[in-house]
Amino acid sequence: MRTYTAKEAEAFVEKNIAQAKRPPTIDAKVRRARAEAHRKDVELARKALSTGSLDLKGLDKLARERAQARRKLAGGQRQEAIKASAAVAKWLSGRLPVLPADPMNVIIDRVTFIRSFADQGVVTDSNIGSLDSWAKYKFQHSGDAIGETGTGRLSFFVLWQNPRTDTIVANVGPRLQVNANLSVNADWNGVAAWFFPDSKALATVRARTTVFAMDSSINSIVSDVILGNVSATGGFFGGDDSTSLAVDQFISGAGVFVPAQAFILIEVSLVTEWQLLDGSVDLDADSGSFKVSVPHLIITVT
């Protein structure tokens, strides 16, 4: 067996990790635009308050106008993210690996079915094929002053049977690719922000793998990984946040016992956890070249 020196290891890190090609995104440009809009908000607020009089109607009018300008900017940023989705899709398509032929690994090159759930988003298009299982998906929700929490959920399911005549330990690992845009908006409050609870919007997108035993209600979450999160508070002018999701990841999972000849159902899901108080959340995996893919799964059998 070949041995490697520390110098060779450092060279590997420099070539394959430190200088690895990154997907094209517009997040840095979006952050700069958002910071500039915030600076202008502060300047206008100071100017309005420097008159020495407290014009509450005028202040609310200023808050409303700046919130409209902010939402227009956010809409433009989302359109730029949609335009950039084709470049991200090209980057993802070039990253599918040659699958190993290890007899201890079971390669599943297509899922069994794809679906979402009531009030947890909509699948607008999908495909199931060899190394080509994907879905276009969108999830949107708005919350009022009562405050709400919940989840969006897109799931890829695989039905698999243990082919052996004895119990095995199966480690399920899906390959997941996500090309999407996650955004939240917290409503403006104007003068009311000085007296009442602030509006807010938070969202986290996770990749989660769950294994179900088909002959019982037992299920196990074998992996759960955060892919991205955003948060915003409303305050006087309102607030928003967004992030591009350009993910290509093999997600290894914990082992589960599978009895001889038993069937299991594997769920690979994209979960959007959200919390809203006078705000909204939008996960767009539908526009442009956005989509979510599970090209294959590898079940390691021991």
Image (cartoon, rainbow, N blue to C red):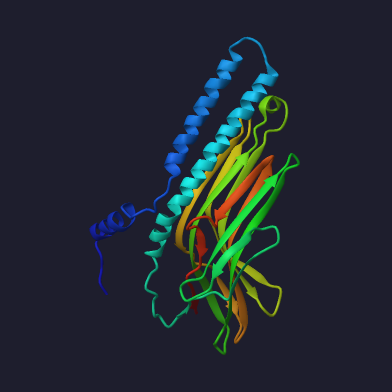
Residue at 54% of width from left, 77% of height from top? Answer: 169
* Front-most of residues 95 and 266: 95
Question: What is the x, y in percent for residue 256?
Answer: 58, 74
Question: What is the x, y in percent for residue 46?
Answer: 56, 18
Question: What is the x, y in percent for residue 178?
Answer: 49, 59
Question: What is the x, y in percent for residue 261?
Answer: 60, 87
The single residue placed furthest to the right in the displayed view is 146
- Does residue 81 appear left or right of residue 189 in this picture? left
Residue at 25% of width from left, 72% of height from top? Answer: 2
Q: Is 110 placed above or below 7 here?
A: below
Q: Quadrant of residue 97?
A: bottom left
The single residue placed furthest to the bottom in the displayed view is 165
Residue at 62% of width from left, 81% of height from top? Answer: 263
Q: Quadrant of the N terminus?
A: bottom left
- Does residue 195 appear left or right of residue 158 in this picture? right
Q: Is 216 placed above or below 118 here?
A: below
Can see residue 191? yes
User: How many numbered circles does the render carry?
Assistant: 0
Can see residue 236? no
